[in-house]
Amino acid sequence: MNAYAQGFLAKLRSHATDALDADDPAAWDALLDETQPHAVAHRDDPRVHTTRTTWIARRP
């Protein structure tokens, strides 16, 4: 689960670079750096929550 979370956050960071404040890139880098103590790789609480919308229809 940690590898999934790390990959997702890395992709999100790369796409959100323009919208981040000046201090945010350093915080993202600390979360993604496996050598940091608070990195996502060392956490034991990542969870994935998803939803799926299903459309059911029939022809008249």
Image: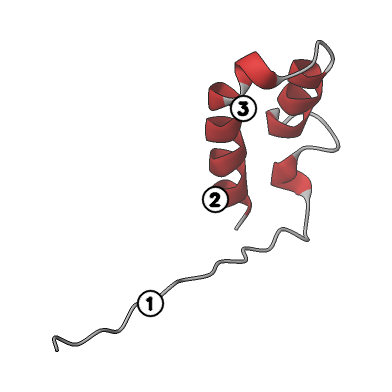
> Which of the two discs, 1 and 2, labels the residue nearer the N terminus?
2
Separation of marks 1 and 2 at Cα, in angstroms = 25 Å
* Quarter of the rendering occupied by the N terminus: bottom right
Q: Answer yes or no: do the residues labelled 3 and 2 have beta carbons within 8 Å?
A: no
Nearest the eye: 34 or 40: 40
Residue 50 point in image, percent of width and height: 56, 66
Distance, label 3 to label 2, CA atoms, is 14 Å
Secondary structure beneath disc 1? Answer: loop
- Image: 3 above or below 30: below
- Element class at badge 3: helix
**Residue denoted by label 1:** 54
Above or below 28: residue 9: below
Name the N-terminal-most of marks 3 and 1: 3
The answer to whether residue 42 is left or right of residue 17 is right
Residue 12 shown left or right of residue 21 in the figure: left
Q: Which residue lies furthest to the front in this view?
A: 60
Disc 1 versus disc 2: nearer the observer: 1
Residue 57 place in picture, x, y as percent? 25, 84
Residue type of the residue flagged with mark 1: Thr
Crowd rating for badge 1 (residues with CA inside 10 Å; few <14, some 14–19, many 20+) = few
Asked if marks 3 and 1 touch (Cβ < 8 Å), the reply is: no
Amino acid type at image mark 2: Tyr
- Decide: is 8 above or below 50: above
Q: Which residue is drawn at 34% across and 77% down?
A: 55
Discs 1, 2 touching: Cβ within 8 Å:
no
Determine which quarter of the picture holds residue 38: top right
Q: In which quarter of the image is the C terminus?
A: bottom left
Q: How crowded is mark 3: few (under 14 residues within 10 Å), some or many (20 or more)?
A: some
Q: Mark 3 points at which residue?
A: 13
Write down the residue under mark 2. Answer: 4
The disc at residue 9 is none
